[in-house]
Amino acid sequence: MQIPTIKKAQTVQVYSSDIQKLLSACHHDPFHVLGLHKSSDKWVLRLLKPRIKEAYVLVQNARKPMSRVPKTDLFEVFLEQPYEVFEYQFETLDDYDQKSKFHDAYRFLPIIKPEDTYLFNAGEHYYAYRFMGARDHTEQGIRGVLFVVWAPNAERVSVVGNFNFWDGRINPMRSIGSSGIWELFIPDISLGQPYKYEIRSRHNSEISLKMDPFARETEYRPATASIIPLSEPYEWSDQQWISKRSSFNWLHQAVSIYEMHLGSWQLAEDGSFLSYREIAEKLVPYIQKMGYTHVQLLPISEFPFDGSWGYQVTGYFAPTKRFGQPKEFAYFVDYLHQHNIGVFLDWVPAHFPRDSHALARFDGTALYEHEDPLLGEHKDWGTLIFNYGRKEVQSFLISSAIYWLEEFHIDGL
């Protein structure tokens, strides 16, 4: 494996208080301590890695041992290096003598573009899903996953998942200026894994575990983790429908809409849900026989409680896992389009549930909802109402609407 080249490191002063904040998982800028830094005439390289007994740095075909900072899981090594740029990887040995070799997540400069953060903060980023959330990413020739989340009132945000034992100390994120956005590129981890954000509030130090508001896929309920999406795009075959749709005259052509709830329209013999694919293939002949031109789906955005029929959404970018993978929902829409049937979708920007794993008090404060209960609570439903005056919430909701229309070819909301 080729060892990558880092960019020029900066000289920084690291104090014992920085080390203590990092070890206590409350440092807002882990890049200030971890990774490679200039120290006088040497380089110091630091790695925070619990559950290992030895750590090494692989540099210029050499394997140099790292020293453990006493009574901590922090390792460091000082390197005498005549160059401003050089290559390295880490190698660790756990208690079972299993070796791991990996790239350093704390060697990269900020990745997301300033124009993206500006537009998101201004309420004018209508495609925020293209940079927020988790996505397959290659940086300096290294493939991994880039995580981006908005949590302006957090003291610290970490990515947690099976890849780091759900330990919030291992992968704390970088705060991007005053934008309230946090990012972290984690090299070498695979797609399709569950993950969440561990958020420590700056107001009361409470720690919460949250699903990703921009997640494109989630676990099957009652599990609540987000899933790192696969990167292979769905190959659509509805070009003829899309072309015809662009010239459709809604005022002078008949539209007959069949409203349906996927979870109860038909079930399997054992009472379980049918898949998106199975429903599509059973639905088309029925719609054709009855003479409908479109189907209107009750919400299929991910939701925790079956009894809400989808009207209490937690995943505004994720088709519910009840009926299969996102690609299978794409197949559902594609199949109906190929048979000249349009698809409308009930979309719910009016309110969201109080479930602690989702949007409610996301960073320890009323972030997506109003702080004032007279404005922020829907008494009839026991839900929370979006703060539509907040610019970032506008970017979030508009991006969600456009996501369903563009990424899943939905014909209307």
Image (spheres, rainbow, N blue to C red):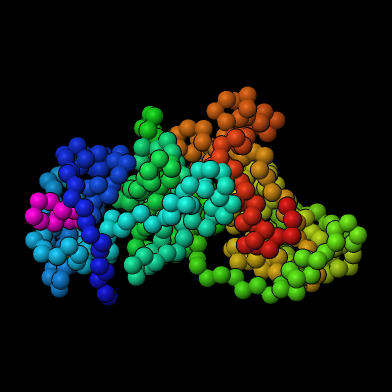
Q: In this orientation, which residue lies closer to the viewer: 198 or 112?
A: 112
Nearer to us in this view, 81 or 385? 81
Residue at image position (60%, 66%) is: 327
Which quarter of the image is occupied by the N terminus?
bottom left
Residue 336 or residue 254, whichever sits in front: 254
Q: Is residue 37 covered in magenta?
A: yes
**Residue at 64% in and 38% down:** 351
- Give the percent coordinates (x, y) of residue 339: 79, 72
Q: Position of residue 111 (x, y in %)?
A: 38, 57
Magenta stretch in the rendered image: 36-47
Residue 254 as seen in the image, left or right of residue 158: right
In the image, what residue occupies the spot 35% across and 54% down? 110
- In x, y percent, where is residue 273? 67, 59
In this view of the protein, can residue 203 be seen by the observer? yes
How many dots with numbers?
0
Horizontal side of residue 96 vs 79, given as left or right: right
Q: Is residue 253 above or below residue 46?
A: below
Q: Is residue 2 above or below residue 206?
A: below
Residue 17 in the image, given as x and y percentages of width and height: 19, 37
Q: Is residue 266 left or right of residue 122?
A: right
- Taking the image as drawn, is residue 278 in sight? no
Toward the viewer: 281 or 364? 364
- Residue 311 counted in the magenta span: no
Q: Main secondary structure of the magenta part?
A: strand
